[in-house]
């Protein structure tokens, strides 16, 4: 019996060392740290919604005099008719002579005649049946005089560029430079007819199969990228005719040239006739209604009919010859006080592809409509977003930056409506906005447009911020490389707080999702950018709190991100500086409430702005400490630990629960590392004093966090003595009744370290600690093998050098003799109905952790039975 006792005594040692290998690998250290070190979760910063829709919110850093206005007056006078004329294919120099055009309109026996191609030729058969009729003989004048009322002739020539002028067009620049002209009027007219046809009209006709064939017939002549007809020497047709005698191929190609040109001319003439007929039949009556109608409802109906008619007649865009007349009528209606009517007008005007001042005015008109939240329904019903998206797609960024600003502002307002936001996402808004952002990013700081484009970028990024709420849009942002472009914009606009805030808000939202967070972590320069912004805008709370939140998300998920951020120059110093700044702001606010006697009364219960920064900043420190080398370095950073302890000193858990608990968690993580010059070790007694205040609170989360810290600190003898002297052990034993695995696990950790000292074991038994440990083993053993292992280790330490099992375990001896064998039976202990991963997890801890300890404890009890 004595030999057995000596044998057992020889083996007796604290079981907290038993399952630990002598030399741990790095992976084992990390895995062990994950069992004791914890990341912290927190809420995303709250962004209040602006009560009014404006280009720039109330918190904008832009001075009023340095930013475009959100409120302005807009009238018909803001539109410019001179910019409403149809645009010709090329810009031509003014003529030195006036061509004789009156003959064409008056003389039916004009010497100009168009050759009639054979009806059954191969050329005609290549043209679609719908177009074949255009190749028939034209009789009489180019345009019937009956089509144009006599009193409108002058107006057509002056402002509308009538069909006759469009079909004849202006003479080529090369032609105006000729010093002599063919004396024959027939030849002169033939040249005019052939060569003064609008470039854009030729291209339109020649787009199809017939056009390709006609190009082939031209031989020496081709079409340049700018739409000009040319040969290799860039000669004009007149030059070619002058050289006809020296070129053997000219007579043959001239015959084809004339036939091709004649076909084009006749096609244009017939198209003009069709347009004239459609204009007078379908468009003109509606314009008359718009001019004489006074009822808004009827005006809206007429605008709807007008848009449909223009679309039906293929008259949208810039091709319509009477475009100026049409636009002039529409502009006058802008003064009517009706958002619905203005919306319909804006849609038509945008579809007519205005530019310059008129584009700016119509974009302002759309902005004004979208600024009123009550118009969201009519905006949705009339598909205004499609028109505005087309503006973003087609208009020049630098030439029309102000128009695009108001266009983008209108889209931003739309994105504040959930229904319109979904529509935008479905119609490719994300890709379009990222493309536009890339164009803006390509404009360098020395460019004169750089500053103004910053205003546009604010609207764009604010819209992306709203779109990032939608799962499909989030996926598109990741797949489209948004992280890279947003980082470029952030880097270029580091001085622009408005742009920075919008982009940071996007990151703040999206970094809460694993896939985007991983993409952001892979963008190595993001850490440098975030630190630069933090240093530059240190007291800008709305920007700082979101950057810190993003860093907290990155360091919560990614061990590489922890290391990379920590290694950035000045990263820890920046965090410390921010900690000091917002700690002082919080102290001043608390002092202000105290002096006014309003402490605990009118003081807001939710975290203040300063507290919110501190909460998220401490979270970053806690998450960084998960990384082994980073955590060890932070544990030695005295200023970091001092600031954490300061939080526990001046802030109670009732003042701000999340702040105090985060501070305790971070101290717990840092206390895990046993390093030289550990700041936690140097301040361990003071920390224990602060934790005692937390332990005695009514907040269970705070109590559990305090016990966790005591679990690490109780490895030091001074802390164990503190726990005994201040009766903390009684409170810890009482926590075993909490019926919560986390609480019991933390309490067992403290008791395990206390029972290493033999003189402290008796106190555990006196307070009924052994019985409570056995109850926990019964309740949680089969579901939490880590906790079961910790309980068995504590019972092992308590039973060291016992003479009989009953002297230690008393009435719980028989319970253990039944309970331990059942827990050691694999078939009884392990639930094989669990899924594979969970079953393997349970078996690993049961086999590697619990089983060795439980077997030795059972043997000890059995060997000391009386």
Image: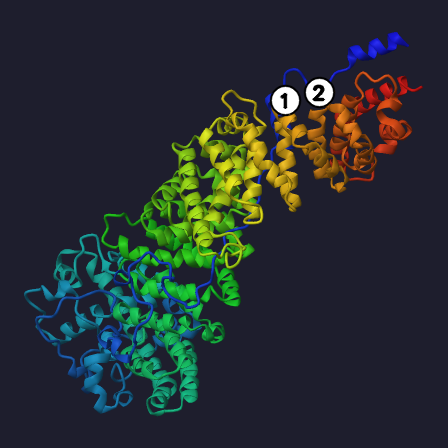
Which residue carries the number 1 mark?
717
Instruction: Indicate which disc residue 757 carries.
Output: 2
Q: Residues within 10 Å of mark 1 (few under 14, many from 20)?
A: some
**Which mark sits nearer the N-terminus, 2 or 1?**
1
Q: Residues within 10 Å of mark 2 (few under 14, many from 20)?
A: some
Q: Is residue 215 above or below residue 338?
A: above
Q: Secondary structure at mark 1?
A: helix
- Outermost top residue: 3
Tell how many labels.
2
Q: Is residue 679 above or below residue 287?
A: above
Residue 201 in which image quadrant? bottom left
Find residue 120 and report its horizontal and vertical position in percent: 39, 72
Q: Is residue 840 visible?
A: no
Find residue 537 and report its horizontal and vertical position in percent: 36, 46
Find residue 132 and report its horizontal and vertical position in percent: 39, 74
Q: Viewer-proximal residue, 267 or 14?
A: 14
**Picture quarter with the C terminus:** top right
Q: Is residue 602 left or right of residue 451?
A: right
Q: Are marks 2 and 1 in contact (CB under 8 Å)?
A: yes
Residue occupying the point 76% across, 35% down: 784
Q: Secondary structure at mark 2?
A: loop
Q: Is residue 597 visible?
A: yes
Find residue 464 and report its horizontal and vertical position in percent: 45, 56
């Amino acid at each position: 019996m004595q030999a057995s006792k000596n044998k057992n005594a020889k083996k007796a040692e604290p079981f907290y060392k038993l399952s630990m290998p002598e030399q741990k690998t790095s992976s084992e250290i990390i895995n062990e740290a994950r069992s004791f070190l914890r990341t912290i979760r927190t809420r995303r910063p709250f962004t209040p919604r602006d009560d009014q829709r404006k280009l720039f919110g109330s918190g904008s850093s832009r001075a009023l005099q340095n930013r475009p206005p959100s409120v302005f007056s807009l009238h018909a006078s803001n539109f410019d008719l001179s910019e409403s004329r149809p645009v010709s294919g090329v810009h031509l120099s003014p003529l030195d002579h006036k061509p004789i055009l009156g003959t064409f309109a008056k003389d039916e026996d004009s010497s100009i005649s168009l050759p009639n191609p054979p009806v059954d030729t191969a050329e005609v058969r290549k043209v679609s049946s719908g177009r074949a009729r255009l190749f028939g003989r034209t009789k009489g004048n180019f345009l019937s005089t009956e089509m144009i009322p006599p009193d409108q002739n002058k107006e057509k020539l002056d402002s509308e560029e009538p069909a006759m002028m469009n079909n004849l067009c202006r003479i080529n620049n090369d032609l105006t430079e000729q010093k002599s002209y063919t004396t024959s009027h027939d030849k002169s007219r033939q040249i005019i007819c052939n060569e003064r046809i609008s470039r854009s009209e030729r291209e339109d006709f020649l787009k199809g199969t017939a056009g390709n064939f006609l190009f082939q017939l031209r031989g020496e002549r081709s079409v340049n990228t700018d739409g000009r007809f040319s040969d290799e020497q860039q000669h004009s047709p007149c030059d070619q005719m002058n050289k006809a005698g020296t070129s053997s191929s000219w007579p043959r190609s001239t015959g084809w040239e004339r036939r091709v040109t004649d076909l084009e001319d006749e096609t244009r003439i017939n198209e003009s006739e069709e347009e004239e007929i459609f204009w007078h039949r379908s468009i003109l009556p509606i314009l008359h209604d718009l001019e004489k109608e006074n009822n808004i409802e009827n005006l809206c109906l007429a605008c709807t009919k007008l848009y449909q008619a223009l679309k039906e007649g293929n008259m949208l865009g810039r091709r319509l010859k009477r475009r100026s007349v049409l636009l002039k009528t529409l502009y006058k209606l802008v003064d009517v006080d009706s958002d619905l009517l203005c919306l319909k007008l804006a849609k038509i005007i945008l579809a007519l592809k205005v530019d310059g001042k008129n584009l700016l005015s119509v974009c302002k008109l759309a902005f004004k409509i979208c600024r009123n939240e009550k118009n969201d329904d009519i905006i949705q019903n009339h598909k205004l977003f499609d028109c505005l998206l087309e503006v973003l797609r087609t208009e020049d960024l630098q030439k029309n930056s102000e128009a695009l600003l108001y266009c983008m502002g209108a889209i931003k307002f739309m994105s504040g409506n959930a229904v319109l936001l979904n529509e935008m996402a479905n119609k490719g808004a994300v890709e379009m906005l990222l493309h536009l952002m890339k164009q803006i990013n390509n404009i360098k700081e020395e460019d004169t447009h750089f500053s103004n484009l910053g205003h546009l970028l604010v609207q764009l990024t604010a819209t992306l911020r709203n779109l990032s709420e939608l799962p499909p849009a989030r996926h598109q942002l990741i797949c489209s490389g948004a992280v890279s472009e947003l980082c470029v914009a952030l880097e270029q606009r580091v001085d622009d707080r408005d742009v920075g805030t919008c982009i940071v808000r996007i990151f703040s939202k999206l970094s809460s999702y694993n896939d985007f967070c991983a993409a952001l972590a892979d963008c190595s320069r993001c850490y440098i950018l975030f630190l630069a912004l933090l240093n530059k805008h240190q007291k800008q709370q709305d920007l700082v709190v979101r950057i810190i939140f993003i860093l907290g998300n990155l360091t919560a998920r990614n061990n590489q991100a922890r290391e990379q951020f920590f290694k950035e120059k000045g990263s820890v110093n920046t965090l410390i500086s921010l900690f000091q700044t917002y700690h002082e702001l919080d102290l001043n606010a608390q002092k202000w409430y105290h002096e006014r006697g309003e402490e605990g009364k009118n003081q807001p219960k939710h975290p203040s702005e300063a507290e919110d920064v501190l909460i998220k900043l401490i979270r970053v420190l806690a998450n960084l400490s998960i990384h082994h080398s980073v955590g060890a370095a932070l544990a030695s950073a005295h200023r970091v630990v001092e600031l954490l302890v300061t939080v526990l000193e001046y802030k109670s858990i009732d003042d701000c629960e999340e702040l105090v608990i985060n501070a305790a968690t971070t101290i717990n993580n840092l206390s895990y590392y046993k390093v030289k010059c550990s700041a936690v070790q140097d301040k361990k007694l003071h920390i224990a004093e602060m934790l005692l205040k937390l332990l005695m609170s009514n907040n269970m989360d705070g109590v559990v966090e305090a016990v966790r810290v005591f679990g690490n600190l109780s490895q030091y003898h001074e802390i164990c003595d503190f726990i005994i002297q201040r009766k903390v052990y009684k409170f810890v034993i009482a926590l075993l009744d909490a019926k919560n695995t986390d609480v019991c696990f933390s309490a067992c950790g403290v008791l395990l370290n206390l029972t290493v000292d033999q003189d402290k074991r008796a106190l555990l038994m006196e307070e009924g600690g052994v019985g409570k440990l056995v109850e926990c083993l019964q309740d949680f053993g089969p579901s939490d093998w880590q906790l079961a292992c910790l309980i068995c280790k504590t019972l092992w330490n308590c039973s060291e050098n016992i003479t009989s099992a009953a002297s230690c375990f008393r009435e719980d001896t028989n319970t253990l003799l039944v309970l331990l064998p059942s827990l050691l039976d694999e078939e009884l202990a392990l639930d094989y109905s669990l899924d594979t991963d969970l079953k393997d997890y349970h078996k690993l801890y049961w086999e590697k952790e619990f089983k060795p300890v439980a077997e030795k404890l059972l043997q000890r009890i059995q060997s000391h039975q009386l």
